[in-house]
Amino acid sequence: MATDKKFQQTRDLISSIAYVYQLKSIPRTGWLQAGIQAVDVESIAGHSFGMSILILYLRPAIQSNGINVERCLNMAMIHDIAEAIVGDLTPLDGVLLEDKHVAEANAFDQIVKDVQEGKYFKELWEDFETANSAEAMLVKRIDKLDMLIQAFLYEKKFSLRLDSFWENMDQLFKDSESESIYKYILSNRFELKGN
């Protein structure tokens, strides 16, 4: 009996992981829409990894602000797993934010409902979506910082302008743990100055 239960738990875990692992090969839509070739575009999983690395680099500053680094890392890792089912929807896709949220909530439930940590994952995702905690607000900011670092690198690599990604970001980073990174990449966007 215990063996059957363990087998079922393992089967449910592998089923959930199979969804999540798809994120390793799903490209981030915004970069494709910006004209970057699919072969060069980071995956959704690559984005989550980038966020996690940024959190680790910024760990001392995050901790000094009384923010739980482990919770931030966990949130960064799971925040986009619903995209394994719904895809990486952007504002250019014309999907209403409410409809996107409902679709992602349903997909998230489908992916994690039968795994032991499913409730914890869902609670993290809901916190991220509503940004009610200090951790969620930080992870939202890191989500944008990772995007801007990637834009900075793509602009250099492909000698192109990705101006729309940089719009209205100043306030988000003002007086934050990542303000210096933001200011550096903003002021060093390859040789675009004056172009």
Image (spheres, helix red, strand yellow):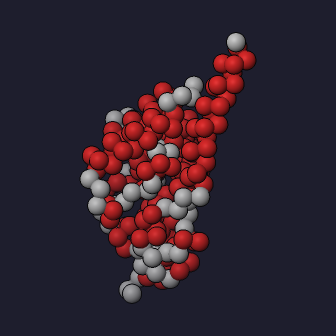
Query: Does residue 41 appear in the picture of this structure?
Result: yes
Image quadrant where one finds the N terminus: top right
In the picture as drawn, the residue positioned furthest to the right comes out as: 3
Q: Position of residue 55 (x, y in %)?
A: 54, 47
Query: Does residue 47 appear in the picture of this structure?
Result: no
Residue 163 lies, with reference to residue 76, above or below; the image says below
Q: Along the horizontal axis of the image, is 54 left or right of 166?
A: right
Q: Residue at x 33, y 44 (%)?
A: 101
Residue 38 lies in what quarter of the image?
A: bottom right
Residue 149 lies, with reference to residue 136, above or below; the image says below
Q: Residue at x 58, y 71 (%)?
A: 40
Q: Residue at x 47, y 36 (%)?
A: 110
In the picture as drawn, the residue positioned furthest to the bottom comes out as: 195
Image quadrant where one finds the C terminus: bottom left
Q: How many marks?
A: 0
Q: Along the horizontal axis of the image, is 14 left or right of 64?
A: right
Q: Position of residue 54 (x, y in %)?
A: 55, 52
Q: Along the horizontal axis of the image, is 180 left or right of 115?
A: left
Most foreground residue, 67 or 99: 99
Most foreground residue, 178 or 139: 139
Q: Along the horizontal axis of the image, is 111 left or right of 96?
A: right
Q: Residue at x 47, y 48 (%)?
A: 85
Q: Position of residue 14 (x, y in %)?
A: 64, 37
Most foreground residue, 68 or 71: 71
Residue 140 lies, with reference to residue 181, above or below; the image says above
Residue 38 lies, with reference to residue 7, above or below; the image says below
Q: Position of residue 171 (x, y in %)?
A: 31, 56
